[in-house]
Image (spheres, rainbow, N blue to C red):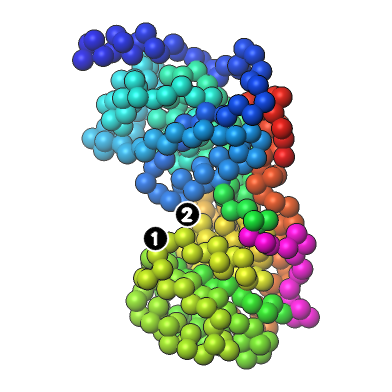
Amino acid sequence: MKAFEEAARVRYQPAAAAKEPPHPMPDKTPLRVIFLADTRPGHYHIAQGVIAALARLRPVDVTRIDVERKWIVPTRWLRARINAKSFYPPRMLRMAYRIDADTVPQADLVVSAGGETQMPNICVTRLLGVPNIFCGSLLRGLEPENFSLIISSYERDEGSDKHLVVLKPSSIDPDELGRPKTVPRYGPDLPPKTLGLLIGGRAGRFHYRDSEWETLLSFVKEVSKAWGTRWLISTSRRTPDSVADRIAELAKDDSVVAKFIDFRTAGPGTLMEVFAMADAIVCTEDSSSMISEAVAARLPVVGVSPKACRFTEDEQLYRDFLMHNGWSRTLPIADLSPETFAATLSEIAPLQENPLDALAEKLKQRLPQLFDDHTSV
């Protein structure tokens, strides 16, 4: 063990701050990225969105390292060690995350999202002496100075030198989906011809009554009858079997349902088909990631919520951010009707830009040392 630590010490040169490369890297040189991923898709998909934006500026060579903390190591101890003068990254990586410092390759940038990746992000960054990007909210006691850039979707972080406030990054490219560059405002005078319905289920503080599922599916039929609209409906792993079975029955009427994607048989990764074909999206409010990805696809999005629901503070701030920008709106399931839905749709001004291009340009401005002499978007 002592020999291992001595070898690691030779390799590890403490870096109080990220260093700029001594010489500009030649054009087309891949950006070597260490991607630290936890076990939650809602987190690592955000980090993948950042990497997708980086790839629009120069080629990327990504090494993914999965992060899973040993739960016998308390967060307060980790936080104390990060801030200690005797902090030694190889020891923390090994003790808390089972990551051998000798297996961490040389890189130009570290990227991660989600609270469980903050400590290893700092460890790897100080180990290699390179810039780092973290996506999300910082744990209490961790200072922004531990990161080169923090990507946030909360308006409270506007004005911070370390924060970049944007839509939660996504690797979805609306241009590749064939989305129109100019999205009309749908409403009473322009009803959508094809609607997407993304259905989640019970999660956290969101609880749906059987009567609310019935109301939602009745609304689907009412819209089709009133406007001639057809639906693309997709369920998720949280959707109750009884609800999926009702949708399967409804889908027998192809004048109402153009396509039903049943998660139980289709599995994950099927939303792109809905995003490509729909004019607008209705999404149950329990799924922040589905709402955010639909916004990123340049779609108007209406979230629908049960009576029993409550957001965490951060999640409420994110929904406020989406609505303040005019990208989405929300309606209680109990208030759904073709008329209320049309009026709500008319308030939405969906994204007109490609969010990957917009994020890439902001990353270039904030971390120019990574992109000097490289082709921009």
Is residue 269 visible to the viewer in this orientation of the structure? yes
Is disc 1 placed on a helix, strand or loop? loop
Is disc 2 placed on a helix, strand or loop? loop
Of the residues under marks 1 and 2, which one precedes in the sequence? 1
Q: The disc labelled 1 sits on which kind of residue?
A: Gly
Q: Is residue 180 magenta?
A: yes
Q: Can you give x and y, in whole percent of width and height, for residue 223 in the image?
A: 62, 85
Q: Nearer the viewer, residue 262 or 90?
A: 262
> Which disc is residue 146 wearing?
none
Q: Can you give x and y, in whole percent of width and height, for residue 277 in the image?
A: 62, 70
Q: Nearer the viewer, residue 204 or 97?
A: 97
- 72 over 369 or under it: above or below: below
| Residue located at (47% from left, 54% from top) | 312
Residue under label 2: 312
Whether tag 1 and tag 2 are in contact, CB under 8 A, the answer is yes
Q: Can you give x and y, in whole percent of width and height, for residue 258 in the image?
A: 56, 81
Q: Which residues are magenta?
A: 177-190
Residue under label 1: 204
Q: Is residue 289 magenta?
A: no
- 131 over 341 or under it: above or below: above
Q: Can you give x and y, in whole percent of width and height, for residue 108 in the image?
A: 54, 24
Q: Report, in whole angstroms, how far the alpha carbon at label 1 lies from the one at label 2.
A: 9 Å
